[in-house]
Amino acid sequence: MANTRSRKRANLRDVAKLANVSVATVSRVLNTPDSVAEATKAAVTAAIAELRFVPSAAARAINSGRSRVVGALVPTLDHAIFARYLAAIEQTLSGYRLSLVVATTKGDAAIEAEKAQTLVDIGAEGLIVSGVTHEPGLYDLIERCQLPAVATSYYDPDFHLPTIGYDNAGAGRIALQHLLDLGHSRIAVVHGSLIGNDRTLARLKGLEDTGDAELSFVEADLSIEDGCKSAQTILSAAHRPTAILCLSDVLATGVLYEMQRQGVGVPQDVSVIGIDDLPGSAHASPSLTTVHLPVVRMGHATAVAISEWIENGLKPSGMLLATELVARDSTGIRRPA
Amino acid sequence: MANTRSRKRANLRDVAKLANVSVATVSRVLNTPDSVAEATKAAVTAAIAELRFVPSAAARAINSGRSRVVGALVPTLDHAIFARYLAAIEQTLSGYRLSLVVATTKGDAAIEAEKAQTLVDIGAEGLIVSGVTHEPGLYDLIERCQLPAVATSYYDPDFHLPTIGYDNAGAGRIALQHLLDLGHSRIAVVHGSLIGNDRTLARLKGLEDTGDAELSFVEADLSIEDGCKSAQTILSAAHRPTAILCLSDVLATGVLYEMQRQGVGVPQDVSVIGIDDLPGSAHASPSLTTVHLPVVRMGHATAVAISEWIENGLKPSGMLLATELVARDSTGIRRPA
DNA sequence: CCGCCGAATGTAACTAGTTACACAGCTTGT
DNA sequence: ACAAGCTGTGTAACTAGTTACATTCGGCGG
């Protein structure tokens, strides 16, 4: 039998030896095949096939100085909003022949900094982070490595990284204004955890100008289940609100379910509004009024920005994406009494 | 001013020169700091800081022969089932100090093969694919590169790659049996696209043994919206079925919404069952009876399998994960008529 | 018939790290 | 007092590609 010394992967020189050519020629066959004579090419190709040669990505990377990888740090994948956003990023990066490495942080800045380091360790050429609240260690890393990095989901022209996102406070304001316009003055607000979550914080900030409405607040985990629980809390309150403003559609979905279960009419008895505009929200029953956040556009824009930065050195400026009210059936005029 | 020739990233030799030591010493400071004298270490550290030296990932990779990256090919990120599964994979890989590159295929085998090539090009050490239907090109690639690769979401002990997944036909069978047990004999089946989707195909296969029930089929895109549409189609049929079996919870959610909207009682007028057991399904109204697919466990198991294979050369055997009926409120005994 | 040009190929020097081995200098044991 | 042993460091050879430059050979023009 032929010596099956295939214990180790073949390299360029093995191929060159077998084909009786130089390493340069093999490299040429791989990269500029037109510059090689047919006969030589055939011999090299045969050797490549025989040795099952596959060029080493690392060796290529060391020469080109490129890894063609960009890293994204997100709190979780287990939430439609981040999943859609990453899907858009991946698609667009793919058009630039860049690959996406995903790392999840559980919304913990320390984990984020740690994972950012591992992204740098595997050679990421750019970083995408969520929000504008991070560890100093992360900023250090970005600075030290001169790493293109953009922050998303939060527009802030004064942030020291380019931000591509929307006006979270504005989104909150739009939702509140809609309820105020409908005459509601006793409103329950259901929001996710505040620790380390600048998006939620900003949305709450947008609710400061309440006119003469009275707001009460319920904190919940970002899940349908906790949306249900929050609804229970709200319904059992002494002075029941006439509207519920959820800072996330996931929570609103839970609230809607609970209302249904308890036979509370939406929007007759209570109006419900969300923020996000998830794919399912339009088809909920009743369909959910919400503030649309352009996460897909944000993903595309982010991917374009980081790609251009990496490929052409064009540091992007920030980008504010518009949010807009999508009035559907879950909100209505406050009933006279 | 100091010569700001920082046009190019500093490398090991630059640091060595500045610190007046050899490259080996710098490398030691980085990797085995305890083997270096304090004074030397300090000098090197200072030089590293001054030059803002960051070691090249590619150069490390070329020496270790490791990229510490594994690639996952999924049809889409925009579906909770894949997102959850990837989240679990990422978490577990992270424990092995491996990173996850995600590539989406839109369920197209050709795109899959292409993206697999780019994953190899960036040096992925392992591949995770969905299902058991792929292009020959993909198999070639895996074979040529001797790449650890596992197929998921579909258990098939005879497949030439290790498979980690569940019995899709069995899941379909369980759902059908549940409806049969409840006395239903006119059942509508709502399923996703069949082209290239072996999971859906297998689930349908599980519905072959119908007893004396009569099945009708509706194909739909995997979205809540198409679930709604399918429900409309079914409701407007001449001979209305008494139960609807959805091959995916997303579709079932849409069906549930539509029933609500049309005032059709679930489960009084019609029973609805899904497959997947998405996080929201338990809280839908009514709560959705479904077949639980252990996607999180699957993600963990897959990540462990590929990691052990990569790190220790232990090629995993396949793994069958149990599915089970989760009886909730959306199914009930067929009403006498 | 000689020189020039260009195509095809080879040589060797890069890329940026890791590491085997050699060796200097000091301490310790006998 | 001298060998042995340890610590700390340097030299140079690796890893696996790309590529600038040199070389060979053939054809063609003068």
Image (cartoon, coloured by chain):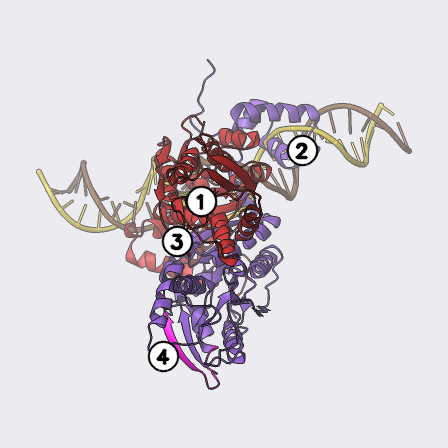
Chain colours: A purple, B red, C yellow, D brown
Q: Percent position (x, y) of residue B161?
A: 44, 30
**Above or below, comparing residue B312 to residue A253 in the picture:** above
Give the Cα distance between marks 1 and 3: 24 Å
Span shown in magenta: A206-222
Asked whether the residues under marks 3 and 2 belong to the same chain, the reply is no
Answer whether residue A218 is magenta in the image: yes
**Above or below, comparing residue D12 to residue A318 in the picture:** above
Neighbor class of circle 4 (other Cα within 10 Å; few <14, some 14-19, many 20+) is few
Q: Which residue is mark 1?
A: B337
Q: Depth check: B301 or B56 in front?
A: B301
Mark 1 against mark 3, which lies toward the viewer? 1
The amino acid on which the numbered mark 2 sits, given as a three-letter code, is: Pro
Q: SS class of the residue under badge 2?
A: helix
Q: Which residue is mark 3?
A: B287
The amino acid on which the numbered mark 3 sits, given as a three-letter code, is: Ser
Q: Which residue is mark 4?
A: A239
- In the picture, residue A298 is in which quadrant? bottom right
Q: SS class of the residue under badge 3?
A: loop
Q: Quadrant of the C terminus of chain B?
A: top left
The amino acid on which the numbered mark 1 sits, given as a three-letter code, is: Ala
Give the Cα distance between marks 1 and 2: 74 Å
Asked whether the residues under marks 1 and 2 belong to the same chain, the reply is no
Main SS of the magenta part reads loop
Q: Are marks 4 and 3 in contact (CB under 8 Å)?
A: no
Q: Earlier in the sequence, mark 4 or mark 2?
A: 2
Q: SS class of the residue under badge 1?
A: loop
Neighbor class of circle 1 (other Cα within 10 Å; few <14, some 14-19, many 20+) is few
Give the Cα distance between marks 4 and 1: 45 Å
Q: Which residue is mark 2?
A: A33
Q: Depth check: B137 or A4 in front?
A: B137
